[in-house]
Amino acid sequence: MRKLILLFFLPFVLFSCKKDPVPEGLDLREEMRLFVQRIAATARQTDPGFIVIPQNGADLVVSGMSASAPAAADYLSAIDGIGQEDLLYGYNRDDQASPASEVAGRRAFLDIAKANGVSILVTDYCSTPSNMDNSYAQNAAAGYVSFAADDRNLSRIPGYPSQINRPNANDILSLDQVQNFLYLINDENFASRQAFIDAVVATNYDLVIMDLFFKDGSTFTASDLNQLHLKANGRRRLVVSYMSIGEAEDYRYYWQSQWKPGKPTWLDKENKQWKGNYKVHYWDLNWQDYIYRGSGSYLSKILSAGFDGAYLDIIDGFEYYE
């Protein structure tokens, strides 16, 4: 009888272990906040003005689950901005208005951040000129800086509007001075690193979010950044580097050919929506070593290249484990 009971429960036990890799009692949201805070603190040991912008996961600005919870003060102090995708357009489908309930829910958290001096950078995925105009107008009315991306892959500089939204003739030295930005992390349409640089330099965006690496595997250098920092009008802009901290990417320099889910232990399943991207136990210090701990970390390469900051993706990775 005991043997039968054990056999009956064995599939349940195996299934439970497979589906629940989270250590008992781990506060998933706090672990992500701490991860971001450690990245910020480490970067600012080298560059005290280093800008940190987590993308999505805006609900981390409070210590609980709802917008009525107390503000997460240490987290808010560590970050300079929050990037929010799909706020007004793109939640269900590109160039389609996001559901009003989702907009209101996200804005509740974004406004908490804004009230605490954090800049809000919205990327709406829309391509119809009227939708792009509406995105820019509504976000500006809310006090947010926005970019209407006409390409979900973020591989081109939009041709509309012909003059960038809210043009700014000033030097940009801090995130709170930014009035517009370009999100361009996919370089597939550029024949060379210099072609990419030239295209960006020909614009007047206040802030550029780009990748540290070009498609040939080379990194953008300090010399490249000196060029990218200049707007077409001769004024200075900010340039920050994209860095995913909630997923591992098999096309990055740190990836090892023998890796597969479970080996190393912090590497989890592949993201079915983005081939080559793998969920990670982001709270594991062995994963964090690759991101910010040590001289060969991703963060150290961003700092060496001369970027003004880092744009941290998959901040909402905690949702996968909740």
Image (cartoon, helix red, strand yellow):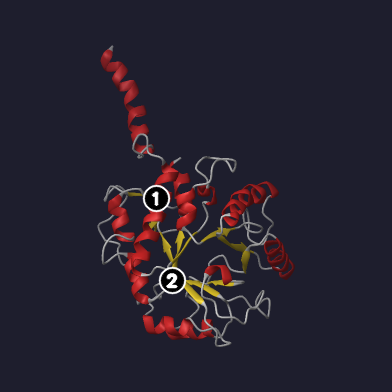
Query: Does 179 sit above or below residue 250?
Result: below
Residue in view at x 48 percent, y 70 percent: 185
Residue in view at x 33 percent, y 28 percent: 13
Residue in view at x 63 percent, y 52 percent: 107
**Residue 49 drawn at (x, y percent):** 43, 69
Q: Is residue 193 left or right of residue 85?
A: left
Q: Disc number at residue 34?
A: 1
- Disc 1 residue crowd, few under 14, some 14–19, many 20+, Cα 10 Å: some
**Residue 92 drawn at (x, y percent):** 62, 53
Q: Disc number at residue 124?
A: none
| Labels 2, 1: front one | 1
* SS label for mark 1: helix
Closest to the observer, 73 or 165: 73
Q: Is residue 249 visible?
A: no
Amino acid type of the residue tagged 2 in the rendering: Asp
Instruction: Say which label, 2 or 1, has the lower sequence index.
Output: 1
Q: CA distance from mark 2 to mark 1?
A: 24 Å
Query: Does 265 sit above or below residue 90?
Result: above
**Residue 233 drawn at (x, y percent):** 58, 87
- Residue tagged by mark 2? 211
